[in-house]
Image (cartoon, grey):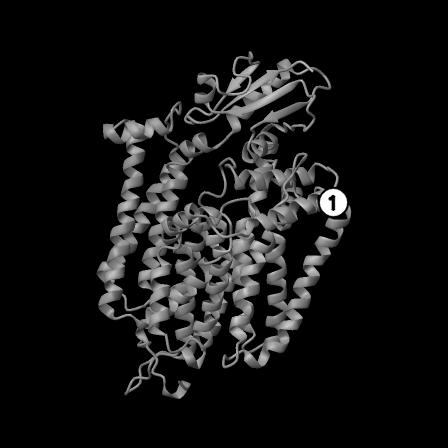
Amino acid sequence: MSQDLRSTPARLTATAAAKLPRPFLLCIGLVYILAGLFYRDPWKTDDVTGLATMFTALSGQDLAWLLPQVGHLAQAQDGPLATWVGAAFIWALRPLFEIFFNPLDAAIIASRVPNLLWFALLTGSIWYGTYLLGRRPESQPLALPFGGEPSPRDYGRMLADAALLLIVATVGIVWRMHETSEVPAMIACQALAFYAVARMLDHPVSGAITLGLAVGLAFLARGWLGALPLILAVPIAFLPGCALAAERKWLAVSALIAATLMLLWWIPARTFGPYWTESWLLWSRNAFDWPSARAWGSVLRDLPWFLWPTWPLALLALWRWRDWFSAPHIGIPLGFVIGALLTLLASADPFEPEYATLAVPCAVLAAFALPTLRRGVVNTLDWFAVMCFSLTSATVWLGWVALQAGWPAQIAANIDRQTRGFEPHIAWPATAFAILGTLAWIALVRWRLRSRPAGLWRGTALSAGGLITTWLLLATLWMPALDYVRSYREVSASLAAALAHNRQPGECIRTQGLGSGQRASFLVFNDIEFSFDGHCPLLLQQLSPRSLESGEAWLADHPALWEGRRGPDRHEMFRLLRLQP
């Protein structure tokens, strides 16, 4: 069907494309990324493992800058980008933060400053990429008989605002964007690649250069699992009949830049770390396979929640714009969806990092669904956002009251079981922020009910504001309890004290059953490193209390120098043993 014969499904007036206040957008972004980023411990597994690779790089260990490692253990997966950037920020900012904090906390705070960079790259790329697509003639709403439709500039800005709010409202990436891991960098690279392809519509050279940088950086962030979704997605936008078909020659520039970035790391890594790179290749090969039935079940169960609320709107956009797949505003984000889905379907054990590659294109497609919705549907979505996030916020407050006061009794009992050993206390500054956030949400709902704004972004503003309110409440009211449940600071300090008392000069420690997250935690909190020497006299075991009680655990009857565990964890404990050579 030729483009001239197609009828656009978008219907919009100029008043519905009213400009979203910039202070509101800025406030949304700042609260989103700052809440929960600082004043907490690193949690297992990806969060603390990423931080441990940064600490190891700064320790001066051989090749740790080139090849990510957790102490003497090769972290031969993903890539070095997050380690490089995080370690550089720790080196630059730790002396400043040590004026106010102890050295460990200063380093932890400095390691999270790059998350501000990744978030800025994510939001800036998705906003400008959507704006470039939204102002094009193919995406414009139906011209009204007597005028009154929005200008292309206002329409594109409205869609860009909606896409930004939708990515912020995406449930699954909230915690991931606050990790010291490769995931925030990977999501930012996905958004940068989307912007680069959109930029090639009018500036093919700069777009091609940016695309090459994005693909190369995605590879350095997460290996082939980060780069492959982009490599599969980009050619779809350059198929014959698409707006970018004539610019496909510039993809050679992108490929050259991406390959150069990859090889600038891979060649020295292969030269100086053959064992590390062999392990990396093995991990990469094992990462791709047909998912098991169990993995399929996990995807079907978790992915809809991870991508809420964008995936229903993204599907609706594909249906409403079904005659416009060759148009850039649908074809480009659809290509990124297809590339991410193909990679996810070929992943042996797909999980949240793989799900995260769908977040950006789904948010963009969801934004283009909004102008196709009838007013009644938009109002229904608004009410759903109000009820849903008011309920989640109230639930967080109710749980906090139960934690502090023991009422309601049943809820308090359930929470006590999950936080066994935790001493509840009220952190008044954090509680004040929680109250302010709740009042802001009430004010936003009141504004929606009383003002009845015509702007089409009002529903996305409610969704983003509601999710951020819930996240802010969790990051303030519940952070002490969450830190207690998920942090290894106390058990690591206890192990360090036991080693100081029982370890003889020159003795090494080996492990049995110790997970990567636990190994990284002991390194981060107390600089405890473990050896692979089978003759080490000290052995640290990680096992379950049940296996120890039943005698099934190895050396269950051997006397322990020390035993430790996190209070609420019923499935994990540690034992320090001394063995004869």
Q: Quadrant of residue 482?
A: top left
User: Looking at the rendering, in which quadrant would you find the N terminus?
Assistant: bottom left
User: 344 or 479, which is in the foreground?
Assistant: 344
Q: Report the residue at 65% width, 67% height from top.
A: 255
User: 300 or 471, which is in the foreground?
Assistant: 300
Q: Report the residue at 49% width, 37% height from top.
A: 39
- Indicate the position of residue 215 as horizontal and vertical percent values: 60, 62
Q: Report the residue at 35% width, 48% height from top.
A: 469
The residue that label 1 is drawn on is: 273
- Indicate the position of residue 495 as horizontal and vertical percent values: 57, 21
Q: Report the residue at 50% width, 41% height from top.
A: 38
- Residue 221 horizontal side relative to residue 367, left or right: right
User: 392 or 273, which is in the foreground?
Assistant: 273
- Residue 422 horizontal side relative to residue 216, left or right: left
- Residue 377 horizontal side relative to residue 569, left or right: left
Q: In the figure, 193 relative to 350: above or below?
A: below
Amino acid at dot 1: Gly
- Indicate the position of residue 34 as horizontal and vertical percent values: 47, 47
User: Looking at the rendering, in which quadrant would you find the C terminus?
Assistant: top right
Task: Farthest residue to the right: give it.
Answer: 271
Q: Quadrant of residue 104?
A: top right
